[in-house]
Image (cartoon, helix red, strand yellow):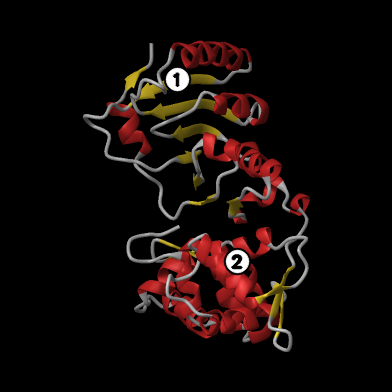
């Protein structure tokens, strides 16, 4: 997912040493290269220029204990959240070894590599990821094989470390990935989507943890297909059922005259996620669910919006 001039494909232009060096710079309040800052933020190692708990652990491993091999392995696992690695893991699962040229075409197809990238551009990363056990790359055969873990390997309590590609090859898993996020939500939950689909209410009803969630706030735009009579009926039923579980529900409308946001988020009191439209998940289009690097001003949008009636 791009953030300004940067994107996850920047990983092909940096080295592990550069990223670990940037982590050290963050720890000492030094100057951090913008590309490294973006990638480390995407992987949950830094946040707003500060080391996260995961970042602190990796810093200690790399620079305090000086365990270089272990640090590179841990960095490799963190980088699995980036789109290029997710594409390789999920699209190659079950296909065996695939020629590196085919992997490059796959990455280009999903815009997960620079548009002018050649095989020589991706080889250094493939070699390194092979060395730290993220994937298998044969320098002799020039072929790549996925080592993606089984879908059930990611436990609900570990969801904050998951970035999940939504792919046509995994129609059931696409919804599973969303459910893994929903199951971990606590406190006040926001789902902000300009084109919020009432189908999402089904997933909320099934997956919200009773006793952990106190309120659900749905924020949408004002398109006619969003605010349809049918979605109103579904909303009324959902709100009534959640009330019996002790969860307050409200849907508000940020109309086109004030709305200045276009992306989609799910957030609770502590966490925030970038998510695709619910229809994208259900149609199995290619997209991404990932931890957001910054929390949008959801409370501000909520305050200016109008309750749906």
Residue 19 at x, y = what percent?
A: 49, 78
Q: Is residue 273 visible?
A: yes
- For the point 53% across and 34% down, the residue is 279
| Residue drawn at x 46%, y 51% as measured from the top left | 292
N-term-proximal mark, 2 vs 1: 2
Q: Residue at point 46% right, 13% down?
A: 232
Q: Secondary structure at mark 2?
A: helix
Camera-side residue: 29 or 113? 113
209 is higher (above) or lower (below) than 132: above
* Image height of 1 relative to 225, above or below: below
> Does residue 3 lie above or below 184 as drawn?
below
Residue 60: quarter of image: bottom right
Quarter of the figure that contains the N terminus: bottom left
User: Which part of the image, by quadrant, shows the C terminus?
Assistant: top left
The answer to which image quadrant residue 77 occupies is bottom right
- Number of other residues with Cα within 10 Å of mark 2, as a class: few under 14, some 14 to 19, many 20 or more: many
Picture quadrant of residue 85: bottom right
Relative to residue 9, is residue 278 depicted above or below? Answer: above
Q: Residue tagged by mark 2?
A: 85
Foreground of the two, 6 or 142: 142
Position of 33 with respect to 77 (left or right) is: left
Q: What residue is disc 1 on?
A: 250
């Amino acid at each position: 997912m791009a953030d300004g001039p940067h994107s996850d494909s920047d990983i092909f232009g940096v080295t592990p040493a550069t990223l670990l060096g940037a982590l050290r710079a963050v720890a000492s309040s030094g100057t951090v290269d913008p590309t490294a800052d973006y990638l480390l933020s995407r992987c949950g190692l830094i946040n707003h220029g500060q080391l996260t708990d995961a970042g602190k652990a990796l810093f200690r491993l790399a620079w305090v204990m000086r365990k270089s091999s272990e640090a590179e392995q841990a960095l490799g696992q963190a980088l699995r959240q980036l789109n290029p690695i997710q594409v390789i893991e999920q699209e190659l699962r079950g296909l065996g070894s695939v020629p590196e040229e085919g992997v490059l075409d796959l990455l280009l197809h999903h815009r997960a590599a620079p548009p002018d990238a050649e095989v020589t551009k991706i080889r250094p990363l493939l070699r390194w990821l092979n060395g730290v056990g993220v994937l298998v790359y044969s320098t002799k055969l020039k072929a790549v094989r996925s080592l993606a873990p089984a879908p059930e390997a990611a436990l609900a309590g570990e969801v904050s470390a998951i970035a999940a590609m939504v792919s046509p090859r995994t129609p059931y898993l696409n919804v599973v990935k969303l459910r893994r996020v929903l199951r971990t939500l606590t406190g006040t939950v926001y789902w902000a989507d300009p084109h919020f689909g009432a189908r999402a209410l089904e997933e909320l009803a099934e997956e919200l943890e009773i006793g952990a969630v106190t309120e659900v706030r749905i924020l949408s735009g004002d398109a006619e297909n969003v605010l349809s009579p049918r979605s109103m009926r579904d909303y009324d039923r959902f709100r009534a059922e959640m009330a019996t579980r002790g969860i307050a529900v409200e849907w508000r409308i940020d109309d086109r005259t004030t709305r200045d946001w276009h992306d989609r988020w799910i957030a609770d009191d502590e966490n925030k996620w970038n998510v695709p439209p619910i229809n994208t998940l259900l149609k199995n289009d290619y997209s991404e669910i990932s931890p957001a690097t910054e929390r949008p001003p959801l409370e501000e949008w909520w305050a200016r919006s109008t309750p749906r009636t």
